[in-house]
Image: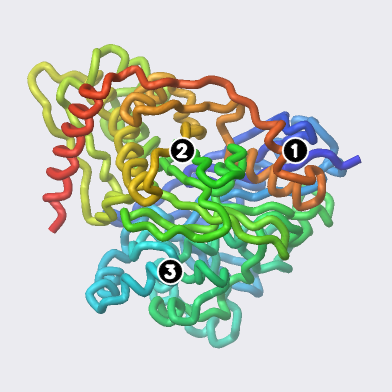
């Protein structure tokens, strides 16, 4: 009997493939990294062939673990880095250009022309998103204008465009399905947040033809079946798809309005379930679709704030400054000092996201003295990861008009106990860490399992989700106010550098 779900978690720096059983236990997981390309300052690219190769390696590696037979896989779930834009040839399946990654800022100037022309409010009202190069729409426009030979292929109807989920589904189904789920579509700046269809006005503003885009579907439903994938039988349903942050919200069992989670990955993202109606933000946050269960199901909306650089800041300490050899060493280095010692690191290495939305901001490291050490820089980095989230939470609470419930945490850096304690302290509330901190994978599995009836309700999934540890705030309110004031001053210095 087929009782396993295979999850593909296609992230910014690598792809994870995992297997979950019908009890909700992750039985095996493998990860393969792929190269990051930085052709110009502020530009970030991936080779689509590298993305697909990392997924294929993961599938083959997970099957070699012999946790189950390929015929015992009931469904495949996909979760993915969002906003990253790709174009490929419908006939050959070959990519026409490198993928433009969500972190990339190459379309900043075009976004500013739209803003100067007074279109920011229209984009916000229709899509739920702020006008920023972060989102897919301006990336599609850039690809359509800068890909050699694409004009001829457009005339021939051979161009397909999509986010990473669309590309993977295309490849997994042997080119039979060009679809995207509603959560990923809601991150493009091209989908109407109300109708959940491509919006003609937005398509016109960003100069993107609807014909190249995928069909928008539910997040939990059979979107297609496998065909011609080495190691996998044909016909396995691809039954669950969601952008990584929405998948994490689902994987954290945040099924009720007011439930919220924070995922610590390359960036960090706080997402809160707001229920069946979109909640528009007055504080610089994003209105997005969390998921839709079944083609006839009602959507669940969310409010989101994201910091572009979280775990990437630790990678910079490792690769750029060389003060650690492995990312987990940052905790030990930060513990060598009592606190940040006045050092402030604002990691605007790819601009600032919510709630500031300053794409041209650049990172600053201030407060250095002769007494400053690598330990202070490491501690300031962990503090910055937590303080960016505090900014987002404060904005979210202004939109809600009330304090948030305890925050559920996940992602790789959630394993860092010092960071979690710092986060609880600067937020002034409890954090809850689940047993499975890679909840993007769990969310993809849950959605796919529900899509084929392996689990029949979110109530069943609540019983699967388990708490591993809770962190309560230990910092007193006066000390918290002082710490936040120091961070706010550093932020203002950073924002002053934006021309």
Mark 2 and mark 1 in contact? Answer it, CB < 8 Å.
Answer: no
422 and 319: which is toward the camera: 422
**Residue 173 place in picture, x, y as percent:** 73, 61
Q: Residues within 10 Å of mark 2 (few under 14, many from 20)?
A: many
The residue singled out by tag 3 in the image is 137
Q: Residue at x 61, y 44 (%)?
A: 255
Is 291 located above or below residue 492 in the figure?
Answer: below
Q: Quadrant of the C terminus?
A: bottom left
The circle on residue 460 is: 1
Q: Quadrant of the N terminus?
A: top right
Q: Nearer the viewer, mark 3 or mark 1?
A: 1
Q: Nearer the viewer, mark 2 or mark 1?
A: 1
**Residue 201 place in picture, x, y as percent:** 44, 81
Q: Nearer the viewer, mark 2 or mark 3?
A: 2
Can I make out residue 319 in this image?
A: no
Q: Residue at x 72, y 59 (%)?
A: 294
In the figure, is residue 28 to the left or right of 467?
A: right
Can I make out residue 343 in this image?
A: yes
Q: Residue furthest front?
A: 401
First in sequence, mark 3 or 1: give its number: 3
The circle on residue 347 is: none
Residue 161's image quarter?
Answer: bottom right
186 and 331: which is toward the camera: 186
**Mark count:** 3
First in sequence, mark 2 or 1: give its number: 2
Label 3 to label 1: alpha-carbon separation: 37 Å
């Amino acid at each position: 009997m087929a009782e396993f779900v295979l999850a593909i978690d296609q992230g910014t720096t690598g792809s994870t493939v995992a297997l979950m059983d019908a009890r909700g236990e992750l039985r095996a997981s493998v990860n393969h990294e792929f190269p990051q390309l930085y052709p110009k300052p502020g530009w970030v690219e991936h080779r689509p062939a590298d993305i697909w190769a990392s997924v294929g390696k993961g599938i083959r590696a997970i099957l070699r673990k012999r946790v189950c037979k390929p015929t015992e896989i009931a469904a495949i779930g996909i979760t993915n880095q969002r906003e990253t834009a790709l174009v490929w040839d419908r006939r050959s399946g070959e990519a026409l250009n490198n993928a433009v990654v969500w972190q990339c800022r190459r379309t900043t100037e075009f976004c500013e022309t739209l803003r100067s022309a007074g279109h920011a409010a229209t984009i916000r009202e229709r899509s739920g998103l702020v006008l920023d190069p972060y989102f897919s729409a301006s990336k599609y426009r850039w690809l359509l204008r800068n890909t050699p030979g694409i004009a001829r292929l457009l005339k021939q109807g051979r161009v397909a465009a999509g986010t990473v989920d669309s590309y993977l589904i295309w490849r997994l189904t042997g080119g039979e399905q060009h679809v995207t789920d509603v959560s990923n579509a809601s991150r493009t700046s091209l989908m109407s947040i109300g109708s959940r269809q491509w919006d003609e006005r937005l398509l016109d503003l960003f100069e993107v033809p609807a014909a190249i885009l995928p069909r928008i579907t539910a997040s939990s439903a059979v979107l297609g079946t496998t065909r011609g994938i080495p190691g996998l039988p044909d016909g396995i349903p691809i039954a669950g798809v969601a952008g990584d942050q929405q998948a994490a919200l689902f994987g954290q069992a945040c099924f009720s309005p007011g439930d919220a989670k924070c995922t610590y990955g390359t960036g960090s993202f706080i997402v809160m379930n707001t229920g069946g109606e979109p909640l528009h933000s007055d504080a610089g946050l994003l209105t997005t679709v969390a998921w839709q269960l079944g083609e006839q199901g009602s959507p669940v909306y969310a409010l989101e704030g994201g910091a572009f650089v979280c775990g990437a800041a630790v990678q910079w300490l490792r690769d750029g400054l060389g003060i650690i050899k492995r990312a987990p060493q940052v905790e030990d280095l930060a513990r060598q000092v009592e606190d940040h010692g006045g050092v402030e690191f604002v990691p605007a290495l790819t601009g600032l996201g919510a709630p500031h939305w300053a794409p041209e901001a650049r990172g600053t490291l201030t407060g250095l003295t002769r007494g400053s050490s690598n330990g202070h820089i490491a501690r300031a980095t962990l503090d910055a990861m937590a303080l960016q989230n505090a900014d987002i939470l404060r904005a979210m609470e202004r939109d809600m008009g009330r304090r948030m419930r305890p925050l559920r945490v996940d992602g790789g850096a959630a394993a860092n106990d010092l960071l979690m304690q710092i986060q609880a302290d600067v937020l002034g509330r409890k954090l809850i860490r689940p047993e499975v901190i890679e909840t993007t994978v769990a969310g993809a599995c849950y959605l796919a399992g529900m899509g084929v009836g392996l689990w029949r309700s979110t109530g069943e999934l609540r019983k699967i989700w388990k708490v591993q540890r809770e962190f309560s705030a230990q910092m007193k309110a006066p000390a918290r106010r002082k710490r936040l004031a120091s961070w706010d001053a550093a932020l203002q210095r950073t924002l002053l550098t934006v021309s």
